[in-house]
Image (spheres, coloured by chain):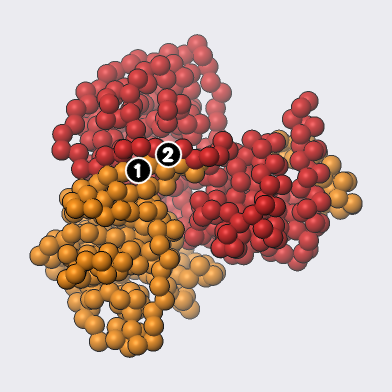
Amino acid sequence: MQIYVCIKQVPDTETKIKLNADSSWIDTAGIKWIMSPFDEFAVEEALRVKEKTPGATVTVLSAGPARVVDSIRTALAMGADNGIHIEIPENADNNLAAKAIAGALKKEAKVDLVFTGKEAIDDGAAQTSQLIAEAVGIPCVTVVLAAEYGAGTIKCKREVEGGAFEMIEVSTPCLIAAQKGLNEPRYASLPNIMKAKKKEVKALKLADVGASEADQKIRYKNFQLPPPKQAGKKISGDPAAQAKELARLLHEEAKVI
Amino acid sequence: MAKVLIVAEQRDGKLKRSTFELVGASAASGNETHVALLGQGVEGLVTELASYGANTVHVADAAELKLYSAEAYVSVLASLVPSVGAEIVLASHTPTGRDFMPRLASRLNVGMASDCVSLQFQGSNIVVRRPVYSGKATAEVEFLGAGPRLATIRANALGMTKPDTSKSATTQKVAATFSGLKTKVTEVVQGQSARPDVTEAAIVVSGGRSLKNAENFKIIEELADVVGGAVGASRAAVDAGYRPHRDQVGQTGKVVSPTLYIACGISGAIQHLAGMRTSKTIVAINTDSEAPIFQVADYGVVGDLFQVVPLLKEELKKLKDH
């Protein structure tokens, strides 16, 4: 069984975002880069399926600038077998990234299962998983909290609003986009981190995967930082007075109650 | 003015408030407003859509559409968009809209802007802005190439318009036949909670690790129930097991923009602020007057949430009962 995991490298959640000189992108200097947290659930799920399936292999794909190879190595240290890096520009959109990854997948002899995170925490667009599936021509289930693997079908529990779930049966090959809770991702052990350094990471360019910068369909511009908030009102007094005054302000001033 | 197609969202025959926001905003800008209404036995919802300004409602009625299915939705919409000649296609950025819209964009071979918090109609184009890095910044989205323009809009971002029940809409039946579907929604398991979802609610009451255990969240729930709000939680509270992950507000949870966000015992870590700072009015209740949450709060109460929250509940109850 050939299992693939697509990951994205993103700024660490603690990053304080700054803009570049002409506000056309963020200032990437000094950022600590990590694998997008939802992708860790995707890697873990791929490894669990592999461990139950004799002869299965897990390949990690990532599209991005050269730095993303570090995150591929993180996935390899968790236990993936090999990696594919497709070089695309820093500010590539979801469409170009999806075309690049789908192009790399289509070059593979056989694709049985593809895992992704339900969204990346940088642009938070939640598009790339579906776009990859469409470009490869396989069905896709997003925001998956639990999956039961059968012969030719997977039963997925998809999280929707208000604590409800959709139970979805999907035929394989397919793409599963992981939600936090699907599993508990493992930590890489030191020996596995050492081993990961020797694993193969294939380097591909856009032209190798039949994609080009013309596949970009949107572009972000005019970045802004949130306007600084005016100092709010501090409400003093004993708890009863504070509660009463807060209720009054919410009703009369903010008019939200 | 443009031809705008809004994909309505309904569950169990009830339309979402966020759908009315989109219909109202399109109509208020003078657009020719079309609505795609997919489901089974949903034609009765046309009058409600008309009251918010829909001109034409395209109804696709089929057993395969009874429960939401991205595959079935996209198969209907990929032919409806060109047949209507829609220049702009909008849906809410909900678990449904965010699921099918990128696939529709792919079928139509166009780009799409996700989770927009502002929207302006400009002829056959739209100007949209969306949060990036979970609200630590925002960016405008430029569409490259030909339309239609596709976008999902965050709930509560546009505001509601007043319905007018004297308005009416034309109903158009849409053929919906399916073959070779590879996914099947077998069941929708309802949540046990009658509260609205944290991403859709107009009011969110959130608790942090200061709640100390899951049982103490009862006071947060009671406050939320008095105002018809949702219950949210910080990552610390979720990691400690006080609340399920679906309630988590922040960069690795949900990003919300309610009209009122009440943070109880939440210090305001950068990753939490990222998830709620676009809320219209923010209240912080915390014992630590130096907590970063006070920097984004419109109203700050330095105090013990175990005392203040129940008292606030009583005060708001009095206002509601009036």
Label drawn at residue A212: none
Amino acid type assigned to the residue bearing label 1 in the image: Met
- The foreground one among B267 and A175 is A175
- The foreground one among B183 and A214 is B183
Q: Chain of mark 2?
A: B
Give how far across and how far down residue B163 sits, in percent: 53, 21
Q: Mark 1 Cα within 10 Å, few/some/many (few <14, many 20+)?
A: many
Label drawn at residue B189: 2
Q: Which color has been applied to chain A in this rendered view?
A: orange
Q: Which color has been applied to chain B in this rendered view?
A: red
Residue beneath the point at 21% across and 66% down: A53
Does residue B224 appear left or right of residue B156 in this picture? right
Q: Chain of mark 1?
A: A
Label drawn at residue A167: 1
Amino acid type assigned to the residue bearing label 2 in the image: Val
**Quarter residue B184 falls in:** top left
Do the residues under discs 1 and 2 have CB atoms within 8 angstroms?
Answer: yes
